[in-house]
Amino acid sequence: MDGLNNSKSCVVLYSGGMDSTVVLHHAALLYDKIYALSFNYNQRHERELACAKDYIFCYNNFVAEKNNQIEHKIIDLSKFGQQLSSSALTNTKLEVPKMKDVIGDPQTLAYVPNRNMLFLSMAASLAESVEASAIFYGAAKADDTSGYWDCTQEFRTLMNQILSLNRRNLIQIEAPLIDKTKKEIIEYGLELNVSFNITHTCYNNTEHIACGECPSCSARIAGWIQAGYKDPIIYNRDIPWEKYNCKDLEGRVSLFAE
């Protein structure tokens, strides 16, 4: 990793989704103290926040030692998010695009304006306050190719250049999945014993069932198929796992068991 000081704490941008959960476990290998930071930005898929709370509750009760608990903070930006009318994730008058509708689109309706710069700036403020040396976020290769410019290596490099202007607190933004495909992220998550069944990826607010058609669901499904396993979450449409020779996780569905 790129961290340059000896702090034992870090901040993780944690949405409750698949990628950020893998990042959370990755950070737990490296740091004694983790501050998980989630945001309510008026996203229509608010279920991800419930998953984030559930996951960290389970992690702290079944996995972490008493001195290695994750501290979870949820920042309410819902009123500000109501102003972001150009995104289908914050404006319910817009329909969430399906994967077939966004192929070749350089920046889809699922893009939330400047979201990661906003979140990372707030994470940097928290990191400086708690003397953390690193911020982790779940940018992945699929995000870059899907038009999310704030998930690119170039964006991370430029943000780190800005943070390097700080005269006292050296903080680095880390993106350990930025060169990984969804398949590779899933495989790494399985190595880390991530409980994928408690994660939410769907852009639609579909309670406990993912739509299976939005760009986020489609990328997740493709990743599981390429990894050769059945995704443990439920979809609103039939996924022909057997057709693709996908195996059950066989007891690895949940890390959290009494």
Image (spheres, rainbow, N blue to C red):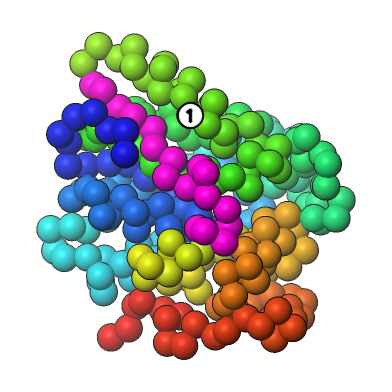
Q: Is residue 234 magenta?
A: no
Q: Name the residue rendered at 35%, 65% in the picture.
A: 192
In-front residue for pair 235/156: 156
In-front residue for pair 25/168: 25
Q: How many marks?
A: 1
Image: 104 above or below 56:
above
Label 1: element kind: helix
Is residue 75 something one can see in this rendering?
Answer: no
Q: Where residue 207 sits in the image (x, y, percent)?
A: 63, 70
Image: 236 above or below 138:
below
Q: Please tell me how crowded label 1 is: few (under 14), some (14-19), or many (20+) other residues with Cα within 10 Å.
A: many
Q: Is residue 92 left or right of residue 223?
A: right
Q: Name the residue rendered at 39%, 32% in the picture.
A: 173
Q: Which quarter of the picture shows residue 223?
A: bottom right
Q: Is residue 2 left or right of residue 38?
A: left
Q: Is residue 51 left or right of residue 73?
A: right
Q: Where residue 239 sits in the image (x, y, percent)?
A: 73, 78
Looking at the picture, which amino acid does disc 1 mark? Arg
Q: Name the residue rendered at 24%, 35% in the picture.
A: 132
Residue annotated with mark 1: 156
- Dividing the image into 4 quarters, which one contains the C terminus? bottom left
- Dividing the image into 4 quarters, which one contains the N terminus? top left
Q: Where residue 22 sits in the image (x, y, percent)?
A: 43, 58
Is residue 100 something one can see in this rendering?
Answer: yes
Q: Which quarter of the picture shows residue 182?
A: bottom right
Q: Is residue 57 left or right of residue 156?
A: left
Q: Where residue 33 sits in the image (x, y, percent)?
A: 21, 48
Q: Name the residue rendered at 48%, 70% in the picture.
A: 196
In-front residue for pair 157/195: 157
Segment colored magenta: 169-185
Image: 100 above or below 199:
above
Q: Which quarter of the picture shows residue 88?
A: top right
